[in-house]
Amino acid sequence: MNTQTERIIDRLNVLGSISDEESCISRFFMTNAHVIAGKMISDWMISAKMEVRKDALGNIRGILRSKHSKAKHFVIGSHYDTVFNAGKYDGPLGIIMGIEIVQRIIDEDIELPFHLNIIAFADEEGARFNTAYLGSSAIAGNFDSKWLQRKDDKGATLHDVIIKNGSLVDSITKSMIPKKDWLGYFEIHIEQGPVLCNADLPVAVVNSIAAQARVNIKWEGTNGHAGTSPMHLRNDAFCGVAEFALAAEEIAVLHKEQLVATIGKCNVSPNTSNVIPGHVSHSLDIRSPNDQLLTEVMATLKEKALAIAKKRQLQCQWKIMQSNASVTCDHKLKTMLTSSIVKANINPVIEIPSGAGHDGVMISKIAPIAMLFVRCKDGISHNPKEYTNPKDIHEALNTCHLFMNTMIQSNLITNTST
Ligand code: HGY
Ligand code: MN
Ligand code: MN
């Protein structure tokens, strides 16, 4: 392994040790660990001779400028927030490899025809405020000020958390890179699925990212005594949720080739063993590469929820928190990435659709995007067992250097021809 791969592994371990929890990796948006991790990334970017700044949403932004004043921006990025009880590769791998791509350009004194940005996005998972892609939305000029009123589980608003972190809410809009200034976006990410393991390949080109919707559903019934309330007189909100959960699973299994549905978060109130739960709120995460199917299933499930509520004399509130259409990766960038994998003597080159969401979803609204997937053991992710072996990291890094060479060559020609 070369120094760069060793440094990547070291840095993954360092970031993996920065957590708000003793027993697992958890780094939600703008928590203490999140701030410490951002500072660490900023130091690494500075050591790779980049100009570095942290924007109002906590995105850590490193830039290596081209000497061409009118140069466009090419951005390599990923996220440094995590889910609860996370692995250490989901997000950090793309940031740390991006910094190594810059390091090589510095070490080999390569002329850049574009400004090379490395962005560590502050909130891709949306675990704290259910706001996936918060950081990248600001870069893409898509930040919705309504999100500022979103509350975390402790009742803190996004607005107050940003202020407390020393940022100015008004300067969020200054985070944007204008559409005319973009050359493109590239993200390196673990596959978080089994395809590369099954194909016994270290990397693959991503061709698309599934459409995704996140819904918050609230059920209101009546709290009651678990011992004295006869079954036929209950308004048990949890039983409504249980019936709905099985209905969601049933429809997802029916369309299992191209749909997934997950209820990952559930708050039961009063959450006491001898009280019939009168209030339950839960998430619904639903995804499909087929936008039409997603829309249809969302409508069917909403109808189903309201029918269950009516039958059980419950109130049901259905609130879409976020929804993003499917994304197609840019053909030109994909072609360059494919040729880089061939040059890296990795074959066959395969293309994989991403069921997972990525910051590229938000950036695709303003710029062409490309993604490189890196094999992870047994496809496990969002789990401390997440693992990518050093050899695959080395192969991925080599592919990225070849991809950067291709990007630089093709844009040097454009610059000299314009
Ligand atoms: O949920 C996802 O797809 C990603 O990990 N944010
Ligand atoms: Mn991720
Ligand atoms: Mn993730």
Image (cartoon, rainbow, N blue to C red):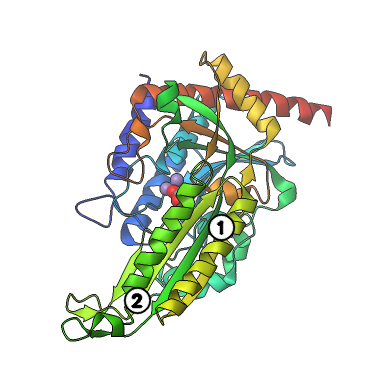
Of residues 175 and 350, the one nearer the viewer is: 350
Q: Which mark is residue 297?
A: 1
Q: Residue at x 28, y 43 (%)?
A: 384
Residue 114 spot, x, y in % from top left = 67, 36
Using the image, determine if residue 158 lies above or below residue 6. Answer: below
For this orientation, the residue located farthest to the top is 345
Q: Which mark is residue 242?
A: none
The answer for how far apart the CA atoms under marks 2 and 1 are is: 23 Å
Q: Secondary structure at mark 1?
A: helix
Q: Are marks 2 and 1 in contact (CB under 8 Å)?
A: no
Is residue 168 visible in the rendered image? The answer is no
Q: Residue at x 42, y 54 (%)?
A: 249
Residue 302 spot, x, y in % from top left = 53, 67
Residue 99 spot, x, y in % from top left = 47, 36
Type of the residue with mark 1: Val
Q: Which mark is residue 237?
A: 2
Type of the residue with mark 2: Ala
Q: Residue at x 70, y 53 (%)?
A: 178
Of residues 80 and 190, the one nearer the viewer is: 190
Residue 231 spot, x, y in % from top left = 26, 80
If you read the primary sequence from the N terminus, does the residue marked by circle 2 or circle 1 appear first? 2
For this orientation, the residue located farthest to the right is 418
